[in-house]
Image (cartoon, grey):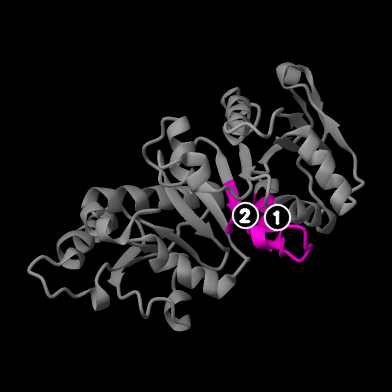
């Protein structure tokens, strides 16, 4: 692959029935992008969506088998044809091609569109974060819902609430926060202020064993000794109040909805989902396929615009 200055952003649209192409075409029209874009999908789907949304900018084909010899030019859009979109393995095949390109060192940027996890993963993985991490044999990773004003990270991801307490350990807290701290230092070039939320209401427990004082607090104290700017545990019902949240760059919660519900309430589509800890940057819009809105041309592209912009600068 012959590049001019910028590595390309690989884009996997995801579900056939989703709002992705609508928001993608809106994103391209509204934003000047420097990095080349390579869409990985079925040519027939791409042509259908181009016609539906009247997108007239040229999209050039690339032969995946000859990609090392292809000339990739800044600001251009390309596609790799993944045939047979009706196959149950279609999305897996799209990721397989993207992973091959990344592992060859041709780029370190990936965006995937909304994916129906239950249909695609069939219970083998809790979510796409775990699926992608496993594909690169990465055991240490974290989900970061990123906004430049405030980000959040759940310690456990797509896990039933009744299983959360058993999964919380000093080792896991330490591991996740070190990954977050490293990401901010290396990619964003500053030391973040990190707040940790407790598990129990008001960080108190009626049982003899209180996770907040027995597990979470010792983990925080250990991290402070490593010169990481972290504090807590804080009650989750007050940490997101304006005067509290403005003191921090990242708020780490014990479970998914504890921190994703407030961040989406605060910023709606103005946030992106980053899998950190991988040997590349994997970003996705912070919403699902939204099948109810398909074809209505009313979907908000802001999260995808933010995702493309985040990778375009790196």
Residue 128 is situated, as x and y percent measured from the top left of the image, at 49, 44
Which disc number belongs to residue 19? 1
The crowd level at tag 1 (other Cα within 10 Å; few <14, some 14-19, many 20+) is: many
Residue 39 part of the magenta segment:
no
Query: On the rendered image, what quadrant is the N terminus found in?
Result: top right
Residue 36 appears anywhere in the view: no
Q: Is residue 191 left or right of residue 40?
A: left
Q: For numbered disc 1, what is the local secondary structure?
A: loop
**Crowding at mark 2 (Cα within 10 Å: few <14, some 14-19, many 20+):** some
Q: Is residue 146 left or right of residue 61?
A: left
Q: From the image, which quarter does the C terminus lie in?
A: top right
Question: In the image shown, does 112 or 309 lie closer to the viewer?
Answer: 112
Tell me the quarter of the picture where residue 164 sits: bottom left
Residue 43 in the image: above or below residue 267: above
Q: Position of residue 48 (x, y in %)?
A: 83, 43
Cα distance between the residues tagged 1 and 2: 6 Å
Give the image location of residue 134, x and y in percent. 43, 34
Residue 307 seen? yes
Q: Position of residue 133 (x, y in %)?
A: 45, 37
Q: Is residue 114 left or right of residue 68?
A: left
Do residues under tags 1 and 2 come within 8 Å of each other at their CB atoms?
Answer: yes
User: With respect to residue 243, does 230 lie above or below?
Assistant: above
Q: Which residues are magenta?
A: 283-310
Camera-side residue: 76 or 58? 58
Q: Earlier in the sequence, mark 1 or mark 2?
A: 1
Residue at position x 62%, y 40% in the image: 110
Which of the 4 image quadrants contains residue 35? top right
In the picture as drawn, the residue positioned furthest to the right comes out as: 56
Q: Which residue is mark 2?
A: 289
Residue 299 in magenta stretch: yes
Q: Residue at x 44, y 69 (%)?
A: 248
Label 2 element class? loop
């Amino acid at each position: 692959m012959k590049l001019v200055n910028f590595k390309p952003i690989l884009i996997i649209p995801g579900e056939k029935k989703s709002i992705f192409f609508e928001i993608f075409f809106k994103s391209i029209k509204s934003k000047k992008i420097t990095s080349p874009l390579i869409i990985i999908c079925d040519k027939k789907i791409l042509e259908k969506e181009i016609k539906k949304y009247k997108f007239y900018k040229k999209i050039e084909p690339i032969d995946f088998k000859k990609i090392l010899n292809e000339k990739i030019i800044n600001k251009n859009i390309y596609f790799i044809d993944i045939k047979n979109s009706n196959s149950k393995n279609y999305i897996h095949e799209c990721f397989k091609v993207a992973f091959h390109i990344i592992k060859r060192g041709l780029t370190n940027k990936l965006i995937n569109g909304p994916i129906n996890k239950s249909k695609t993963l069939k219970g083998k993985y809790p979510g796409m974060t775990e699926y992608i991490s496993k594909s690169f044999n990465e055991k240490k990773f974290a989900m970061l819902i990123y906004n430049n004003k405030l980000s959040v990270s759940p310690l456990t991801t797509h896990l039933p609430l009744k299983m959360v307490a058993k999964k919380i350990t000093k080792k896991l807290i330490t591991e996740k926060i070190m990954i977050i701290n490293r990401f901010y230092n290396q990619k964003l070039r500053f030391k973040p202020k990190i707040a940790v939320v407790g598990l129990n209401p008001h960080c108190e427990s009626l049982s003899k064993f209180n996770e907040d004082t027995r597990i979470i607090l010792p983990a925080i104290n250990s991290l402070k000794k490593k010169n990481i700017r972290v504090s807590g545990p804080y009650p989750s019902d007050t940490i997101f109040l304006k005067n509290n949240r403005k003191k921090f760059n990242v708020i780490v919660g014990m479970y998914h909805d504890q921190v994703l519900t407030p961040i989406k309430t605060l910023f709606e589509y103005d946030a992106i989902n980053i899998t950190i800890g991988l040997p590349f940057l994997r970003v996705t819009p912070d919403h699902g396929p939204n099948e109810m809105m398909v074809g209505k041309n009313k979907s908000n592209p802001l999260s995808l615009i933010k995702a493309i912009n985040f990778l375009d600068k790196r």
